[in-house]
Image (cartoon, rainbow, N blue to C red):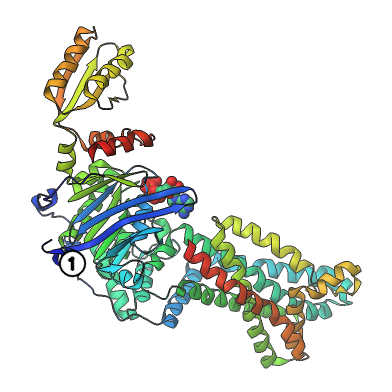
Amino acid sequence: MTDLTADASASPRTASAPETGTPGIAALRRVPPPTPPGPLSNALVFGWRAILKFRHVPEQLFDLVMTPIMFTLLFTFVFGGALAGSTGDYLQYFLPGILVQTVVFNSVYSGMGLSTDFQKGLFDRFRTLPIWSLAPFAGLMVGDLLRHLIAGGIILGIGLILGYRPDAGLFGTLAAFAMLLTIGFGMGWVFIVLGLLVRTPMTVMTLGFTILFPVTFASNIMVDPATMPGWLRSFVEVNPVSLMTTSLRGLMSGTASLSQIGLALIAPVVLTLTLAPVVLWLYRLR
Amino acid sequence: MPNVENERTNLAIQARGLVRRYGDMTAVAGIDLDVRRGMIFAVLGPNGAGKTTLLRMLATLTSPDAGTATVMGHDIATAPEKVRFSIAMTGQFASLDEDLTGRENLVMLARLWGFRSGTARARADELLIAFELSAAARKQVKDYSGGMRRRLDIAASLIVTPGVLFLDEPTTGLDPSARQGVWRLIRQLAASGVTVLLTTQYLEEADQLADRIAVIDHGRKIAEGTSRELKAATGSGVLHVSLADSGQIEAAADLLSAHLGSVVQRSPEGAELSVLAGDAAATNAAVTALITEGFALTDFRMGAPSLDEVFFALTGTPDASAPDAETEKAKALA
Ligand SMILES: Nc1ncnc2c1ncn2[C@@H]1O[C@H](COP(=O)(O)OP(=O)(O)OP(=O)(O)O)[C@@H](O)[C@H]1O
Ligand SMILES: [Mg+2]
């Protein structure tokens, strides 16, 4: 390479006359950095962003709840009588399961959101800010949890209208929602990893549903596995989605055992412990 | 060495031997950079030259495989958080949340910086006024034009006044008037004391804006200086030759190249050749040779080289598809 100068003072810009036209920039105050905020404060800003998105893109709510609403109506009224004797009994069985399915499916959307943020370069903007480097992910999680709460609330509301009654009452329902958020948190990691690995949001969605459809259908969400062939039943019984569904049913009807709760928590805990470091590593790599 | 310490503190950016590889591909192959505070420094290079990679390393977004750099006195490898306090980066593609409004984007970033919501909103409004975006403040960014997006993207980098502002191809894709607007903005920012490191593929942009220009290609810096110096370094001028018969163009190009030792550039229309010509005697001999060899010239003249021609001379090709020619040239110039 060539260094052509000793003297850089003869620069073209300093010689040229000052610009006029937009006094705005010249008048702009110089602002020094404020005291850095804590991670919690950062995460809350990301949560606020998620709420703003609901306001500007209300359609996304439609995406989140339309499938579970359709499932609830179809399964309850079309298959319910045949599967459980009466539509009312079936709804009682099915509703906790569809809540699990809603949360699990919704984590795909956060992976898509992450992929979009990367594609748009928004993550780069966040990363050049002097904030806790995991704050954008924490923020994503906050947004996710909000989405899970909203979608779960809507599905539960529809269930109540249709005649679903949680026997465990308010306390059991709150415990069930805490379980749902834990499940959503655990599943979130899977799609954050996908979002980091896959370049286009559409691919994240396709891949996500390719994984999730078999896992949610081959579970006890819709039907009691007792009627399934043995090989399938042995899968369904250990399928984490079944374990989650069982515990949610237990929590909402007030019959949950500690072991049911413990089994349901295995997948979220394992996913968090294994995938959080993977996310960190992938993030540093990018 | 006198004033070493002084020199150091005067530099907004100092990079030594920065390298970044992606698999087998070396995106940045050892770049040194010294950027004094308060200047506009342009990194000029064609597609794939490594401009974005270089900027991302300096902005702590990508870690170098080798080499060191300090930005505003802080080491990018050992103190990236300190670097982030004193920089802002506007990426090659607008880094905004398309679903939010312009104002919400700015407020969100201000709050991430740590401003309370009242202060954050006030700063967002100041920036919107300064960047003439007040009218669109409450529109979603996805409805913005390219120029508005760019302005908002730059505004988003000024929530806290940065010591160094990195701008990756700030005017790519803008129409001429939007481009002029961004240029004006950049000049005003520099006048207010912000060091600007920008990348560009446009020679004109570097020529118009920058105090100093580094030309990079294939991950290497092949020249650096003011635009005047770069032009001067490539010789006293450029010889332009127009032929009556465009069928003779190859033969004429070979002859010119043999006499002047530089790569000959062909005009797209085909009948005109231009070649860097430093030495008057050799130039004279080349033109004489063309005439005695029977080429019919409709015109020949000497001109000062444009930065385009400088770039061509340095890289050996306008789109830099011949790495060997370019490294040879770089060696010759070094
Ligand atoms: N994340 C990446 N993974 C693999 N290769 C990469 C990556 N980023 C850049 N490269 C490669 O490194 C080289 C330099 O890329 P870079 O984006 O820095 O060039 P550039 O000068 O900014 O080009 P452009 O003008 O097109 O923006 C290119 O060949 C590119 O393909
Ligand atoms: Mg680039």
Q: Classify 10 Å Cα crowding around label 1: few (below 14), some (14-19), many (20 and above).
A: few
Residue at the (28%, 38%) spot, across then down = B331
Residue at the (69%, 70%) spot, across then down = A69
Q: Nearer the viewer, residue B135 or A71?
A: A71
Instruction: Report which quarter residue A206 is drawn in.
Output: bottom right
Quick one: SS at disc 1?
helix
Instruction: Report which quarter residue A163 is drawn in.
Output: bottom right
Residue A33 versus residue B58 in the image, above or below = below
Residue B256 versus residue B47 in the image, above or below = above
Residue at the (26%, 33%) spot, across then down = B313
- Asked if the beta carbon under badge 1 is closer than 8 A to the nearest atom of ligand 1, the reply is no
Split into 4 quadrants, where in the image is the N terminus of chain B? bottom left
Can residue A12 be seen here?
yes
Residue under label 1, please give it: B9
Q: Nearer the viewer, residue B272 or B102?
A: B272
Image coordinates of residue A262 in percent, x first then y, are 72, 86
Q: Is residue A174 left or right of residue A216?
A: left
Residue B185 versus residue A50 in the image, above or below = above
Image coordinates of residue B15 in percent, x first then y, are 28, 58
Instruction: Report which quarter residue A254 is drawn in.
Output: bottom right
Q: Nearer the viewer, residue A142 or A59?
A: A142
Q: Is residue A144 left or right of residue B219?
A: right
